[in-house]
Image: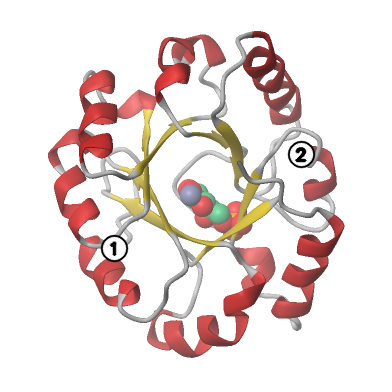
Amino acid sequence: MDVSLSILTIDYAKIQESLAPLEEAYTHLHMDVMDGVFVSKISFGSDLIASLRKTTNIPIDTHLMIVEPEKHIEDFAKAGSDMITFHIEATEKVSQTIDLIRSFHLQVGIALNPETPISKIEPYLSKVDLVLVMSVHPGYGGQKFIPSVVEKLKSLKDLKKKKQLRFRISVDGGINNETILAVQPYADMVVSGSYILKNAHPKEELLKWKHIFPSDAI
Ligand code: DX5
Ligand code: ZN
């Protein structure tokens, strides 16, 4: 199991000093970009990604919660993202967005909100590297995991097997030491932010996850 650390709820004045001691304990850095339109809040843009890119070799997993993501792929690719995930609900140009991300030789992720059925992303599953299943409504860190998402994860994994596809499954929102147990049978990656960042021993917690659920990354 890979662990992508979301910095959404970090103290932005202390990003580097907070992240540096955790570095070997997580596998990806999850960057939640919000535009105030697709979700109500505005978070940060590509400049923060470009700055962090200079400080770490950890793969950067950029999660775009923005409308018309196709207009901004080049910017986020050039900032140093290794993987760019966009929302199926945010664009009419799904295939073009996938191809655009791929043209920068990056991994492609497609995200879906809790109420969006798997059938909406099904036509694109053979073209993506990752499906990001939202287990909270996008927009804020620190929300409670929505339990019905576990059933959706199971269906997605069954579909993947049935169609013999290779995409990885990531779960984003409300992941803590209990909810990780519920998603573990279906997820290749979890995104976690507030639970880790508020923990008194974040590194120990991340290492526990790493040891309990060894990565079987393909
Ligand atoms: C929600 C974001 C998530 C979230 C993860 O819109 O996409 O990445 O902040 O953080 P926690 O672990 O706090 O739910
Ligand atoms: Zn996210």
Asked whether mark 2 lies closer than 8 Å to ligand 1, one says no
Residue contact at pointers 2 and 1, CB within 8 angstroms: no
Residue 15 x, y percent position in the rendering? 44, 82
Front of the two marks 2 and 1: 2
Q: Residue at x 85, y 46 (%)?
A: 181
User: Could you say which disc has been placed on residue 103 in the image?
Assistant: none
Quarter of the rendering containing residue 3: bottom right
Q: Nearer the viewer, residue 95 or 18?
A: 95
Residue 118 appears in view: yes
Tell me how the rendering is colored: secondary structure
The amino acid type, in three-letter code, at marker 2 is Val
Quarter of the rendering containing residue 79: bottom left
Residue tagged 2: 183
The amino acid type, in three-letter code, at marker 1 is Phe
User: Callout 2 environment at 10 Å: few (<14), some (14 to 19), or many (20+)?
Assistant: many
Relative side of 95 to 113, left or right: left
User: Callout 1 environment at 10 Å: few (<14), some (14 to 19), or many (20+)?
Assistant: some
Q: Quadrant of the C terminus?
A: top right
Q: Nearer the viewer, residue 87 or 188?
A: 188
Q: Residue at x 38, y 32 (%)?
A: 87
Residue 198 x, y percent position in the rendering? 66, 75
| Residue 113, placed above or below residue 120 | below
Callout 2: SS: helix
Asked whether mark 1 lies closer than 8 Å to ligand 1, one says no
User: Could you say which disc has been placed on residue 44 in the image?
Assistant: 1
Q: Residue at x 75, y 83 (%)?
A: 200
Residue 12 x, y percent position in the rendering? 40, 79
Q: Of callouts 2 and 1, which one flags the residue occurring earlier in the amino acid sequence?
A: 1
Callout 1: SS: loop
Residue 119 x, y percent position in the rendering? 51, 9
Q: Residue at x 25, y 69 (%)?
A: 50
Q: Which residue sits furthest front?
A: 218
